[in-house]
Image: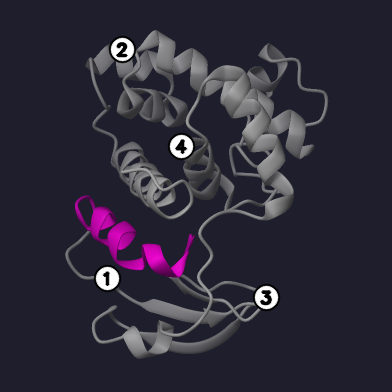
């Protein structure tokens, strides 16, 4: 899971709510465009420039370098169109994509979820997706699914995001965010990115 630099503290602190109190290792990388990234695991294809056991006193490693405040520009038009169509905050869509796939349209999970918004086969079929690797189709279906979940849970974004990860039936069964560590970490990460994207990309609080 790679983190944009301006999110390094917020996202990792949110993770700490559900993780052991000590972060084992933090890796610092330089990307192909000169951007720097903090990650909690090795990242193939990036240049390792430092490795530490915490983010403490690491500002000089990250300072004075371009900060990415969202996904690749080539996906932004798809995000904007789908967000407008289904009435979903584009910052939330970007946050889900960041956590689900890191904006990699070719991402495939061990469970078979595919593409930017990690669609399962059943979900893709429900929204008539022909190619889950196609960014436009994938984003359109993912946002439609988010809209359906938000409507199901009366606009509660936290529950909708939890359902996107664990399924609506799990949220209904527990009448709230399921007590699964993975789902709770997922919700924490998505909401952290959502807040940051709203502030840095869309100028909203």
Residue depicted at x 67% and y 52% = 104
Are circles 3 and 2 on residues that touch, CB within 8 Å?
no
N-terminal of the pair, mark 1 or mark 4, is 1
Measured as percent of width and height from the top left, residue 180 is found at 29, 35
Q: Which residue is mark 4?
A: 92
Local secondary structure at mark 2: helix
Give me the C-alpha separation between circle 1 and circle 3.
Answer: 23 Å
- Judged by its main secondary structure, the magenta piece is helix
Circle 3 residue: 45
- Please state which of the two labelled residues, at mark 4 or mark 2, is closer to the viewer: 4
Secondary structure, mark 3, is loop
Q: Which mark is residue 161?
A: none
Does residue 40 appear anywhere in the picture? no
Label 2 sits on residue: 172
Q: Which residues are magenta?
A: 1-18
Q: Circle 3: is it few (<14), some (14-19), or many (20+) Cα within 10 Å?
A: few
Query: In percent of the image, x 67 and y 77: which residue is there?
Result: 33
Find numbered disc 4 in the image and state the secondary structure of the residue it sits on: helix
Report which quarter residue 134 is drawn in: top right
Query: Along the horizontal axis of the image, is 168 left or right of 18?
Result: right
Q: Are marks 4 and 3 in contact (CB under 8 Å)?
A: no
Residue 30: image x %, image y %? 57, 82
């Amino acid at each position: 899971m790679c983190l944009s630099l301006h999110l390094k503290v917020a996202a990792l602190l949110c993770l700490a709510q559900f993780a052991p109190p000590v972060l084992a290792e933090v890796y610092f990388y330089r990307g192909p465009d000169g951007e720097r990234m903090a990650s909690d695991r090795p990242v193939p294809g990036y240049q390792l420039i430092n490795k530490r056991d915490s983010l403490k006193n690491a500002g000089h490693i990250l300072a004075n370098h371009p900060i990415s405040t969202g996904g690749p520009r080539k996906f932004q038009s798809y995000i904007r169109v789908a967000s407008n169509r289904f009435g979903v905050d584009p910052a939330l869509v970007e946050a889900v994509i960041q956590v689900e796939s890191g904006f990699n349209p070719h991402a495939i999970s061990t469970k078979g979820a595919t593409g930017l918004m990690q669609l399962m086969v059943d979900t893709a079929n429900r929204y008539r997706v022909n190619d889950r690797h196609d960014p436009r189709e994938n984003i359109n279906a993912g946002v439609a699914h988010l809209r359906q979940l938000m409507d199901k849970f009366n606009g509660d974004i936290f529950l909708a995001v939890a359902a996107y990860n664990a399924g609506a039936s799990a949220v209904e069964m527990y009448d709230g965010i399921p007590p699964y560590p993975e789902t709770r970490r997922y919700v924490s990460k998505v909401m952290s990115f959502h807040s940051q994207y709203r502030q840095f990309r869309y100028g909203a609080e």
